[in-house]
Structures are given as structure tokens and as C-alpha cells.
Image (cartoon, rainbow, N blue to C red):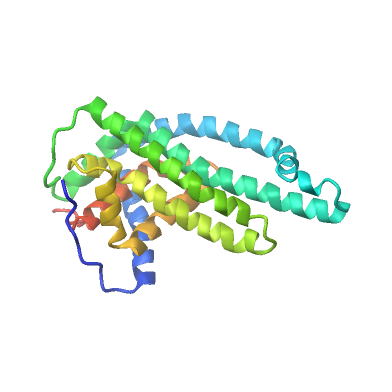
Amino acid sequence: MDAPRLAAPVTGAVTRFLGGAGLLLRGLGLYVRSPGLMLLGIVPALISGVLFVALFATLLYFVDDLAALVTPFADDWSETWRSLIRVAAGLAVVGLAGLLGVLTFTAVTLAVGDPFYEKISERVEERLGGTPGAVDVPFWASLRRSILDSLRLVAISALVGVPLFVAGFIPLVGQTVVPVIGALVGGWFLALELVGAPFYRRGMRLPERRSLLKADRPTTLGFGVAVFLCFLIPLGAVLVMPAAVAGATLLARRSLGQSVVEEG
């Protein structure tokens, strides 16, 4: 089905960005008021979190070797310049791994915990008046589509991450501007991934949700960047993931022009 075209809000971009970040806090509030779902929501993220923490710790252990591997041209440089370029290379490797790690963690966790996160999203929609235009999508078909769309998003983000990785070698810029751009890129793809459940519930796929979220990009980025930064905090991804699913449901409803106010 074709996505409806909605006019972009007239408020300022900064206000909308902050409003998007606020959706994560609202999602947290909606989530914690469902005690029965809290533990179930954390379990899938905890399973994925243990795996990804182990992988990231392994990367940090070998980061010096990887930095040397991608900078063979510096072997004959003076020790000072060789050390500087390899520190920059190490930071670039960690930055790229962080970007891809957050997105891959989200994709894996959503796949592992699909029934739990679907229930959280449904509970949020019930409190906001239900799901207009809901369609009956079989579980396995929904899971297959979710995995395919997630793989597509991770692949696209990897292509975007390569130029950021290269830019990470630029002194000063690579350690200041590039992380900000990385957070914005990661936040955008993260938001696209997290809103999958409410859009699938309406029979809408990745192209539709991308089009709708673009109509209010600052709000989408505000939400996505807030989640992205929380996911970078140790154990943040495990604790925030269920609230991010709830907040993403609010974001999806707002992008569709549907109520995000709880009914009495």
C-alpha cells in the first residue's frame, strides 16, 4: 500500500529534534507501567547483549593489531607519526564497529525477541486507542520480512560507514565531526529499524516507513540519536531496548498522523 503523504510540522527543527528524543522518555514511561512485560522485554536484549559485549571486548583487545593492519603505509614513518596515524586508525575502527554493532545488535535482538517486542508495541497502541488499519500478518511471514529489511538496513549503513571510517583518519575532524555524523546516521537507521513492528501491523514495509519518517526527519533523528547514545552506554542497550520499542511505536503513530495521547 502507498504511504500517505503528511505535511511536515511547522515548528523549528531543534524543537522537533528534542521532541523526538522525548519520545524515548515517554516510551520508557509507558513500558514501566506494564510490569508483566518488563522482564520479558529485557531477556532478549540481555542474550544479545552478552554476545555483542564479548565481540566488542575482543575487538578492543586486537584493535592495535587491526590499526597496524589497515595502515601498512606507515611502517617506515617516524615513531611519532606512525603512532598518531595508528591511534586515529584505531579510533576509526572502534567507531565503525560501534555504528555497525548498535544496528546489528538491534536487528538481532528484534529477531530474537520478536514476540515480546510485538506485545510491548501492541500494548502501547491499545493505550493510545488501538491500531487503525491493522492487518493480520502470520508470525513467520512477519519475522522473515523483518529480518530481510534489517539486513538491508545494516548493509546500507555499512556502505555509509565506509566513508566515515576513512574520514576518521583526518586529524581533529575524525575525532570530532565524524562521531557526530556517525550518531546522526546511526540514529536514522536505528529509528527505521525500531518502527518496523507498528508498520508491519498495518501492512507497510520499509519503503513506506522510510517515506513517512522523512516527512519529519528532525523528530526521527531526535528519537534515533537518543536511542543510539543510550545503546553506547554499557548495559544501556539491554535496559533501554524495550523502552525504545515503545517509543518507536509513538514515533510510528505520530508519523502516520495518529493519536499519541493515552485514552482515559
Res 124 quadrant in image: top left
Pinpoint residue 2: horizontal percent, then vertical percent.
17, 50
Q: How many marks?
A: 0
Q: Residue furthest left?
A: 133
Residue 249 in view in this figure? no
14 and 68: which is toward the camera: 68
Pinpoint residue 60: horizontal percent, then vertical percent.
67, 39
Residue 225 in view in this figure? yes
Quarter of the N terminus within the rendering: top left
> Which residue: 32% across, 32% down?
114
253 left or right of 179? left
238 left or right of 244? right
7 left or right of 13? left
93 and 231: which is toward the camera: 93
154 left or right of 93? left
Say above or below: 79 vs 64: below
Q: Residue furthest front?
A: 73
> Which residue: 21% across, 43% down?
204
Pinpoint residue 52: horizontal percent, then vertical percent.
54, 34
Q: Residue furthest right?
A: 78
140 and 109: which is toward the camera: 140
Pinpoint residue 30: horizontal percent, then vertical percent.
29, 48
> Which residue: 53% across, 60% down?
180
> Which residue: 75% across, 49% down?
86
